[in-house]
Amino acid sequence: LGVPRLLKWDKVLKVVSRGSKIVTDPDAEWRVDGERIVHEERLATLDDFPTLMMSEGSSSSSSSNNEEGELRWESEDVGHVENTFWPKEMTSLDFRGPGGIMCVGKAYTICDATPLKEENELLHEGPFSEMRTELGVQENGMRFRIKLDYSIIEEDSVSTAPPLHLRTLTVCRETLDGYWPNPADNEILEEGDDDSEEGKSEVRRRNQEEITAALFGPPGAAGGLYDPPPVGSEERAADNYMMLDFEGGATLLLPHRLDQHHDGDETEEGGSSSGWVTSLDWTPGRIRYQVDRKVMGGTKLKGLRTLELSEVQGADADRYRPKDGGENMRQ
């Protein structure tokens, strides 16, 4: 099939993301065993916008989206957000590796999958009909994350372990201060002169320039990935991987096709992994981050081998760039 052709959605969804901890067993011997992490994502309502934006005199672009006092989202918008990338409740055991969930430093990854066969009794082992995984970095009150949604295709459905193909890729740019990343979404415009297109924004954000550069600046990490990971032979890389640049100085390496039919050895000759790797490189400030999500091969591809995070001063990245040709971190 080759590298897939990506179609960019001509819409930006405004989504509110929240996490919380709930207690399920206050008498548990170990506190973490009686707690669960619950994650929620939902489409924004007017209540999620700064108060100034909702006052009288809001810009016409806001009011046109708000004829009946609410934001209008289409069914495809709702369906996209309701497609969750995590278990309903995350336990401490989910962070052990097989579940594909882990945190390290400023980076994290989460995962969820649907077994190909309903009678599959192995919680984290495939083959899978769908798999959704997410990779992100949080720093300086911002978060940049990537959602990857994989599924089998109809022509492969007769196989006992069909490959998973990339279905959708979602880029999430977030700020944690209660305002939206794009300053235009936080503004209430003063009435300007009749011949002016818009007035001046009344909303001021102390670090808006830094946020704009980190989330919407020129695409691609300087020089590509800081430390390209091993992906196997050239043929394997060409058949299964692609690299993309995103606004905000980010670069992503990802597999667009995931084989499930061969478990093989964890490491092939020469140190190239028989599993899969997804790498995100992003510089939200002085520090440049690269996070590598490395998973098993075959039917165990949901399980993490490692979640690796590299940190380097952005200005010094070229000087200290690894020259080992791509190696896994020592464990």
Image (cartoon, grey):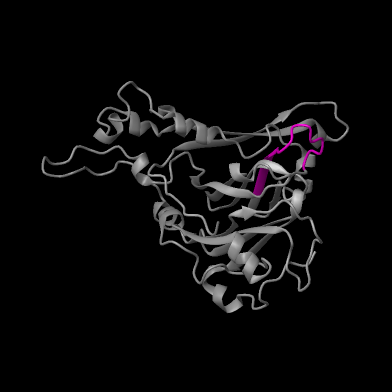
- Provide residue 76's location: percent of width, then percent of height: 46, 33
Number of marks drawn: 0
Magenta-drawn stretch contains 32:
no
Regarding residue 147, the answer to whether it shows in the image is no
The answer to whether residue 82 is above or below residue 286 is above
Residue drawn where x is 75% and y is 44% of the image = 126
Regarding residue 213, the answer to whether it shows in the image is yes
- Provide residue 58's location: percent of width, then percent of height: 27, 32
* Side of 180 where 318 appears, left or right: right
The answer to whether residue 48 is above or below residue 308 is above
Magenta-drawn stretch contains 113:
yes
* Side of 198 where 90 appears, left or right: right
* Side of 81 where 182 appears, left or right: left
- Provide residue 201's location: percent of width, then percent of height: 28, 43
* Side of 208 where 198 appears, left or right: left
Residue drawn where x is 13% and y is 41% of the image = 193
Q: For residue 124, which quarter of the picture?
A: top right
Which region is colored magenta?
Answer: 109-124
Q: For residue 324, which quarter of the picture?
A: bottom right
Q: Quadrant of the N terminus?
A: bottom right
Residue drawn where x is 72% and y is 38% of the image = 115
